[in-house]
Image (cartoon, rainbow, N blue to C red):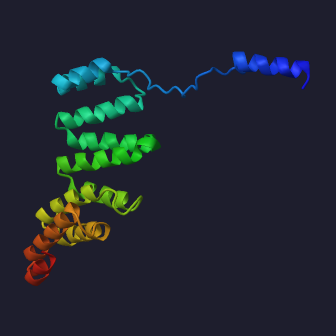
Amino acid sequence: MTIAAVAGLALLAFTGAPGCSAEPQAPSFALPTPSFPDIVATAAQNPADALKALESRRGGNPSIEADVLRARLLGEVGRHAESADVWEAVAAAEPALATFARRASVRASLAAGNVDRAHVMVRQLLAVGAATDHTDLALQAAARLRTAGRHDEARALFQRVLEAHASGSRAEEARLGLAASLAATGDAAGALAEQ
């Protein structure tokens, strides 16, 4: 080893490599500063006032953050149909939030009593991802369809849940819903077989 190599090795050993510290550094991640902390704080006490304040500050080209907050607030003040529309707009505008927003839109549609819209969106959600994904929403939509007398559509969703869950609470809920639907349409033998 030459004297220059030994000196370089000693320099590295005592001072560390250029740009490296003695302790490993983890990457630094931070969420951006919220745009509407005052509105979020108001929403906890008075969602209607928070919605008014947000509407006055959104502007002509609102951010995804503003749309998500608006969708939440619309739901909290009971304007569920509007909330579902905004959630769908969020899903279309931001792919990273699409599944979350579509699930929220289904819940808002069910709360608004729009079973048709919820049913269509649940079927779309069930068509992508794992078989067990979204079966919670499928059960909710199926129950609404059953109580509306739309038994064929309800049974199809209950069957879809049973295909994904052979056992467990969701399977039991699906079996009971399927049995109730069969009984309501006069198929007592089928209803008893499901229970």
At x 31%, y 31%, the residue is 69
- Determine which quarter of the picture holds residue 13: top right
Q: Quadrant of the N terminus?
A: top right
Residue situated furthest bottom in the rendering:
189
- Determine which quarter of the picture holds residue 185: bottom left
Q: Quick check: 40 above or below 120?
A: above
**Label total for image:** 0
- Determine which quarter of the picture holds residue 115: bottom left
Residue 142 left/right relative to 127: left
Residue 90 left/right relative to 3: left
Residue 62 position within the rendered picture, expressed as x and y whole percent measured from the top left: 40, 28
Q: Quick check: 140 above or below 181?
A: above
At x 11%, y 81%, the residue is 187
Q: Quadrant of the C terminus?
A: bottom left
Residue 11 position within the rendered picture, expressed as x and y whole percent measured from the top left: 77, 16
At x 62%, y 21%, the residue is 22
In this view of the protein, can residue 18 be seen by the observer? no
Residue 38 left/right relative to 145: right
Q: Quick check: 146 above or below 93?
A: below
Residue 17 left/right relative to 132: right
Q: Which is nearer the eye, 155 or 9?
A: 9
Residue 21 position within the rendered picture, expressed as x and y whole percent measured from the top left: 63, 20
